[in-house]
Image: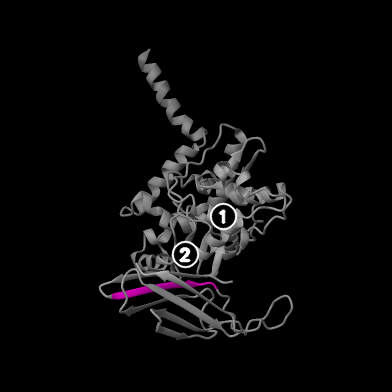
Amino acid sequence: MATIKIRAKESGGVTTVKTLMSHPMETGLRKDSKTGKMIPAHYITEVTAEHKGNVVMTANWAGGISKNPYLSFKFKGAAPGDQIKISWVDNKGESDSASAEIK
Amino acid sequence: MKKVLSILGLALCIALPQAAMATPAQDLKEFRDYFAERFPNTPFDDYINGVYSIDPASREQWEQIEEFAPYELNVSNGQAMFEKAFANGKHYADCFENGGIGIRQNYPYFDTQRGEVVTLELAINECREANGEKPLKWKRGPIADISAYMAYTSRGNVFDIKIPDDPRALAAYERGKKHFYQKRGQLNMSCADCHKFYSGNLIRADKLSPALGHVTHFPVYRSKWGGLGTLHRRYDGCNKQVRAKPFPAQGEEYRDLEYFHTYMSNGLAVNGPGARK
């Protein structure tokens, strides 16, 4: 399905996680120029970041977030070599997740 | 005798430049000298970064974006498309030298057999048609992704566009050069007006990028487009911006322009695909 790219780096006890998610993020307010009908809303509603089974970040999104969203956040308590898992769920019930190693 | 000869020699030297056209090599030198004078603090190799080589404020923002660049998805997509076989079992790699890897800097070139300029996008679609596939649209979408992947594999390679000793090649170059310097549109502006003579100046809220190193980062992810586009897509937009009717993408005019435009960036490295405002 869609891809999640993750880059995570630890420095001075703080891990910075950057992720690029591939998703159309349709607001539901756009009209299809060919059919004249509104393109139905299709956007990520929740993004969760997990580290060692603990949820370290939750993001609640809606149509205002851009297509192929880029997200960056920081958290404490991880060490290089650990895995960080990013998952998302969208308004159609689709989901995806990916993990990456913290460098 | 010697005096007569030297006077004659001097007279010829004065007369000749007026009669002859500048050679492409002379044009290139003049082009580089112009920008070296206009932006004395910019190192030559940095011109590949366009407006970010002359504007520190936006450079900082751009460098942050580059840490996780928006075109990465396009490159992955392009790679998948490039590696996928055609219906007849052949691949893009069969159409290009070195399997299509690390060859961006060789385009565009003047094909002396066909008597025209061949750009990378043209070569991609010709490869498709030669293998029974439908050609792709020129300005955005799959062709931009494939071109992005091919540019990405060529990063760091230096452009060295040649003009073969063929009057048709020189004519194509001259047509491209003429297009670049010719005023057009309702606003009556040429490419050179914005990107050479007024480069570094502000146009509303944007800084005009120098034409030196202009093409090295294409195809480009423009925040304005929210996606990737080819060089000819930008030519189309630029013509529209001065309220001139754009030429067809990959038509003779834009290919000749790309030929001149890329020649002017000889000596600079490929850094495509790029991210711009």
Is residue A19 rendered magenta in the image? yes
Task: Give the x, y percent position of residue B224.
Answer: 52, 70
Residue kind at label 2, given as amino acid type: Arg
The image shows residue A4 at horizontal and vertical percentages of: 50, 71
The residue carrying pointer 1 sits among few (fewer than 14), some (14 to 19) or many (20 or more) residues within 10 Å by Cα, namely many
For the residues labelled 2 and 1, say whether their Cβ atoms are less than 8 Å apart.
Answer: no
Element at badge 2? strand
* As drawn, B89 above or below B275: above
Asked if residue B18 is positioned above or below residue B236 in the image, the reply reads: above
Q: Residue at x 54, y 72 (%)?
A: A22
In the foreground, B43 or B103: B103
**Which residue, given by chain and number where applicable, does mark 2 sit on?**
B276
Please state which of residues B111 and B149 is positioned toward the viewer in this rendering.
B149
Q: Which residue is mark 1?
A: B147
Mark 2 or mark 1: name the one nearer the start of the chain.
1
Provide the residue span drawn in magenta. A14-22
Dominant SS type (magenta) = strand
